[in-house]
Each structure stands twice: as C-alpha cells, then as structure tokens.
Amino acid sequence: MRLFEQDHVYSKQMKPKADERAVVQGSCYRFTVLTSQLIRMEYAADGVFEDRPTQVVWNRAFDVPDFRVIEDEHELQIITDHVHLYYTKGPFAPNTLYVDVKGNFSTYYSRYTFNGPKRTLKGTARTLDHVDGAVELDEGIVSKQGYAVIDDSTSFIMTDDRFVEPRRKDVHDLYYFGYGHEYRRALRDFYQLTGPTPLLPRKALGNWWSRYWRYDETEYKALMRRFKTEDIPFSVSVIDMDWHVTDIPEEYGSGWTGYSWNRNLFPDPKGFLKWLKEEHLLVTLNLHPADGVRAFEDQYESMAEAMGVDPATGNRIPFDFSNKRFIQAYFEQMHHPHEADGVDFWWIDWQQGSTSKMEGLDPLWMLNHYHAVDIARDGNRPLIFSRYAGPGSHRYPIGFSGDTLISWASLAFQPYFTATASNIGYGWWSHDIGGHYRGAKDDELAARWVAFGVFSPIMRLHSTFSIFNGKEPWRFGLEAERSMQSFLRLRHQLIPYLYTMNWRNHMEATPLILPMYYEHPDEDAAYDVPNEYYFGSELIVAPIVEPMNKALHVAASNVWLPKGDWFDFFTGHRYAGDKSVRVFRGIDEQAVFAKAGAIIPMAPHHSGRNDTANPDELEVLIFPGASNTFTLYEDNGTDRSYETGAYAETTFTLDWEARRLDIRLSGDATVLPEGRTMTLLVRGVKAEGAYKQETQTLRLELGEVDRDMTVELPVDLTSNDHRLDRLYRFLDRAEISYDLKDRLYQMSAAKTRLEAWLFDLHALELERDLQDAIMELMLD
C-alpha cells in the first residue's frame, strides 16, 4: 500500500466537519456546541476557520445537543443543560470569554476564563527518562473543579493527501470540557473527538522480554530455552539496538541508527525470526532513526534510488519526516523487508529529537502516526512501541515510558503515573519493569516491581547494558525468584480478562487502569489514594511500593475500599468496605481486591508454554456477595476480522441470591477452540466438596462447555473463619519475641468482644506496623 495514496486504518475515524446546526459564528469567532458539555471555541481575526482534522482532533460530527443562544451587538451567551458560556465580542481574553459549569460547584473554582489557571487532575508526560521519582505531568481533561480545556491552536492540520501542514498563526482553537464530575462521560467524548484506542494483538498482553544487551543468536535462543525450563512464559521478544550493525567507520558518525542485521551476531536473521515465531513470540526491533540512512546499510542503494540520490556518491540520506518521499521510502526500503522476514512491529526509540524542517512539527508524533498507519496495512492492527507525543497519542499504542532509574522512588511513582494517564485517554503505558539503570541490586525491589508490572497495562522486563544488570528471576535470591516466577505466570493466566478489557478500551472508551475517583467522584477518599486504581471492571490494586518491615517480613500499602464487600484476590479474605486500611503483604503477595460478585475469566497455567491463544481450558474465578454480569470477549487475537463480526462472547450472569450462574455463548464460535472445558473457582466462600481452605475456594469442574448452561453454586459467604490460621502464619515468620507471639496469639484466640480486644491490643503499645498488621488479619 502506498502510504499517501489510499485510505488507511484511521481514515474512517476522521469526520472533521461539525453539523452546521451546532455552530454559532460571527465575523471573527466561532463556537461549536459538540455536546452539552463540550464546546469548541475559535477566534481568527480574518474570520477563516478550520474544518479539517488536526493532529489531535479527528471527529467533530457529534449529534447536536439542545442549547440556547442569547446575543446582541456586543455580547453572546450559549446555554446548555450543563454549561453557560459568556463572550464579549472581540479578541479572546480573560475579560471577554468565560464559561461556568452548572451544578454543585462554586463559581470561583468552576469558572473557566480564557488563559486562566489550570486545575485538572493531570494527564501524563512524554517520558520518564532519567527520572528518580516524580515528574511534572501535563494536563488532562477531567478536573475536580468540573472543567478542563485542550488548546489545539498549534497542532498540525491533516491534509487531504494524508500528510500534514502547519496551522495559521495567531488563531485560537480551544475545546472546553465542562463535565463536572462525570469523568467517564468526559473520557468517552474525548475518545469520540480524537479517535478510539486500537485493539491490541492478544500477545501484547503477555510478558515481554527486553534487555539492552549485545546478544548473539546462540545466547538468545539459550535464554529463551532457559525460560521454558524455568516455566516462565513470554509472548513478546524485544531486541534492543544491537540487532543491527553498531560498530561503523568514524566517517559515518555514531552507531545508534541502523537498519542492517549484525550478521556476526545473527548470521541467519530470517531463520532466527522464524524460530522466535515457532516459540509463539511477537518480535519488535529497536530503532534510533535520527542519522538517516548511510552508505553501509544493506538497503542503501535501493533507498538512494528511491530518493533520487546517486548511490555511487555514498551520500547520507538525512532523516526528514517533513518529506513525504522520504517517509514512503523509509518504510518501503528500510522496514518492509524486515517485516516480510518476521518483524511484527517497531520500537521507536529517542534520538530523532523534537524539531524538524517544518517549523513546529514534532518528529516523534510523525513517527508514531505513520509507523502505526504503515504496520496496519493489509488488515493488521496498529501497533508501535514509542514515547508519548501529546493528546491523541492513545491512537498509537504502546507507550514506552523511558529509561527510569532503579530505585524505590521510581517504583513508587509509577502506579500514580500509570493511572493518571487515563485522564488524557492514554491507557497502554509500558514501563521498564525493574528499572533501567543506575541504582543498586535489591531483590525485594525487583520482586515488588514485577508484582506491580503484572497488574500494569504492559508487563515488560528491561535493564541496561551491564553484565550484572539483568531481570532474569534466577539472578535474585530464592524468595524474590519464586515471587517473580509466580507473578510472571499469573500474567499469562490473566490474559482472557485483560483481552476483554482491551476490547472494552477500544469499544467503550474505558482504559484498563482508572484512578479511583472515576467510579467514586464524590468521595473525598478516592482522591487521597493516588497509587490505588481499578484494574479492569472487577479488581482494585494498591501496589506495594515501599520496603518491607524486615522483622515482620511484610510491607504496607494504604488502601481505601469503597462501600460493599471486597475480597483478597489470592486468599478470599473478606473486607467490609467504606473504610481505609493499611494492608500488609509478603514478598510473594500483592494488594489486589475483587469486588463482591466479581467474575474473572482466566487461563490455567500450562508448564513450558508461551502460547496466549484463546485457551482450550477456561478457569472462571468468581467472588460472592453480589449479583453481577461479565462478558468475556474473544477473537483471533491478530487481525481486524473482528470488524466484520469474527468474534465470540461468553456472558456470565451471577445471581447471588439464587446462588446461580448462567453461562451464555454468542457470536462466531469458530474463533474458539473445539472442545473447550470450563472450571469455576468460587473464592471467598464456605462450601463442601472440592474445597481449598487456604484460599476459601470451591472448585467446580463443568467439563466441555459448547452450549448455554446454568450452574448451581452450593456456597455461602465466607465468615473469615481462617483468621487464626492467617495470624499464626504471620506471627510464625515474624522476628519478634516468642513471649509476645504467644501473648498476641492467645489474646486473639480468646477474643470474645471486639472492643475489649482492641483495647487490650492498644494497651500493649506495639510498634505501629505490628499492630496494624494484626488488626488487618483479625478484622473484616
């Protein structure tokens, strides 16, 4: 496909012309009421306005909402059900343009004035390169004060020939979001305005192996075989920059940029890629395109001819993404041959800078957009791996957050950073799990980072070029190694759930990870737990991001549990909600909570397999306490045939009061494995039969399920009768005096009245972690 000559995967999303009935226009201003909460505000002294798509905004064809206009010669008011806009005709200024959000908000804090203060809940940042801890975030589109604004005045125009051109100067083009606390609605309309997030290939949701290391083919294959021996699954192979020739003559400059396989390391690249595919791995190669194409490259001659350069001169062909001819040749000559050999997508790394020949044009955005367009030819899904390039970047997953330092401060910032990115629609961040460079080896930190990574959007291990700095679990102490192995296996078990959330993100504008205030916008506590987030529709995660109490062998996380019952994902321990609690977890645990009624489809772990396909055995984890419905989504996981209906849905409807689960299949069953069997794991219950006390789980094997069915659930809600067992295991490991252990255990075993027990516990004047850990274990 010629990149600039045919419609591409994003073309049908571009409906940039608004309905004329939504427009209020004067000689130098134009307001477009896209929804009752979203208004486009434009000013141009010459009265010429823009109706083409931009880098950020692709669709303005919204249904026209009801609104009123009050106007005279000097003033204009636009009134909708949700906002009230005031404009004194003339250039936009703080004293001529302001908008109020209607509802229970104060005028002072909920009034937007042109160029006024920004009070959003933030968005994300371009990169975490060289960051040790927190970094300042850009603005998002949701705010506790009820409004936010995107300034689109300087983003480039998408032209009819599928290229870009700069905006005219001295114009204002703003999008006002007045959604109050309707954060989900704001995000939904933001996606409609800018385009949806593509559906990721299924393999992208498994574990990624990545390391900046000068591998050769033999070493790399041996490593992959070792992972299989260790029973650690992977689904994506990331090969850093040393796949290509880096030792080049001085006359050519540095070796960061390269497109030709280093055949000293990989003598048979096509065979090597074929071997990785047989191991069920997607493959991505690293790019640093800043230095263009130089004469030592295998494809130099064809590239030179495509660019009209005499190959005999050996002249460098500069990197120039403001040049359509270069872009076309860049893909056709330098990338397509590798893709034909088996490369699935590209890691677009730094080095190309932030400026280009076209003033104001960000080459990172250009690379992201055109790489996504190009890789999606022939029915593929858009897939890149690159840094964030501003609002609208959610259309080009997956995000590479950069080279973070190895430190507890880096880990502690990443849950907040990841969740908050949803405020600008950016849902697929991939971090250097374990940290990239510097720092010191810390077994506990490595294990905690992996436990977070499994409950983050993309699980990618990574490290810098050091013989000592690798993230292979066997490099760490036994406890850390076992923890890392267990969590990496869990990631692949979660793929059915994750892939359904992938579909939800694509179709329903809901990222996998959301800050707590999305579900609870009027609860002050939801804003006070920045590191806690919803992980899909069924789970809450509050990652452990601080070192453990060495004497107690556990670390704490501050958790706010909303109203209702919540269950520890791993043990089934029930917690009463509507409260904040410090929870404590060992190095092999993570703070993950399932809502009452949660339904989580999973794949069983199969030893020594990387396969991430729709499983022929399905394990459905169910939690008690409330009725719920969950629809599992499945397709072939690779191409875009789902757009024409090639997908299946399995709907699980839990009627808790009746203790019944209905299972209904619909859609295209050809995408499902034949003879699929299903097992229910009902956790957090009391039951007879195939029951595991340690996790309070009843196992119900349903056998082959190829039809609708109803299952009776002979269970009752847990009363946490295993409290003393949990307390014993905790105290047995704790490095405290035996007398204190005995006293604490006996006092808890004899507990008759809660108030008296709490007073006795307090009277012991225990160290805070010990007291809080015991209270978590013994209380609901």
Image: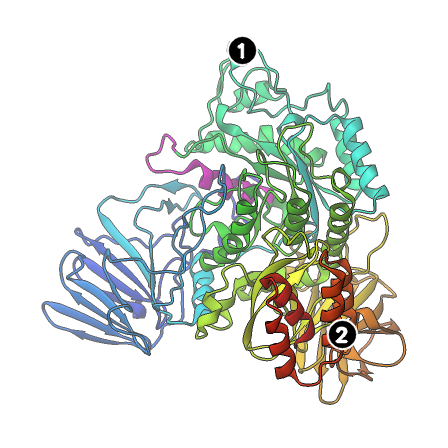
Q: Which mark is residue 598?
A: none
Q: Is residue 364 left or right of residue 532?
A: left
In the rendering, at what x and y percent does residue 575 appear?
65, 75
Q: Is residue 39 left or right of residue 434?
A: left
- Name of the residue lying farthest toward the bottom: 658
Q: Of residues 165 and 273, which is closer to you in this image? A: 273
User: Badge 1: how crowded within 10 Å, few (<14), some, or many (20+)?
Assistant: few
What amino acid does circle 2 point to? Answer: Gln
In the rendering, at what x and y percent does residue 228 appear?
83, 43
Kindly state the secondary structure of the residue where label 1 is placed. helix
> What is the tally of numbered marks visible in this picture?
2
Mark 2 or 1 closer to N-term?
1
Which quarter of the rendering shows the C terminus? bottom right
Question: Which span of residues is magenta-colored?
Answer: 355-375
In the rendered view, tell whether residue 232 sits above or below residue 226.
below
Kindly state the secondary structure of the residue where label 2 is placed. helix
Residue 506 in view in this figure: no
In the rendered view, tell whether residue 215 sits above or below residue 532.
above
Residue at image x 41%, y 34%?
Answer: 354
Residue at image x 28%, y 74%?
Answer: 106
Q: Which residue is mark 1?
A: 250
In the rendering, at what x and y percent does residue 291 appear?
49, 23
| Res. 696 image quadrant | bottom right
Which quarter of the rendering shows the N terminus? top right
User: Badge 2: how crowded within 10 Å, few (<14), some, or many (20+)?
Assistant: few
In the rendering, at what x and y percent does residue 195 appear?
48, 57
Q: Which residue is mark 2?
A: 746
| Res. 701 image quadrant | bottom right
What amino acid does circle 1 point to? Answer: Glu
Q: Of residues 734 and 128, which is closer to you in this image? A: 734
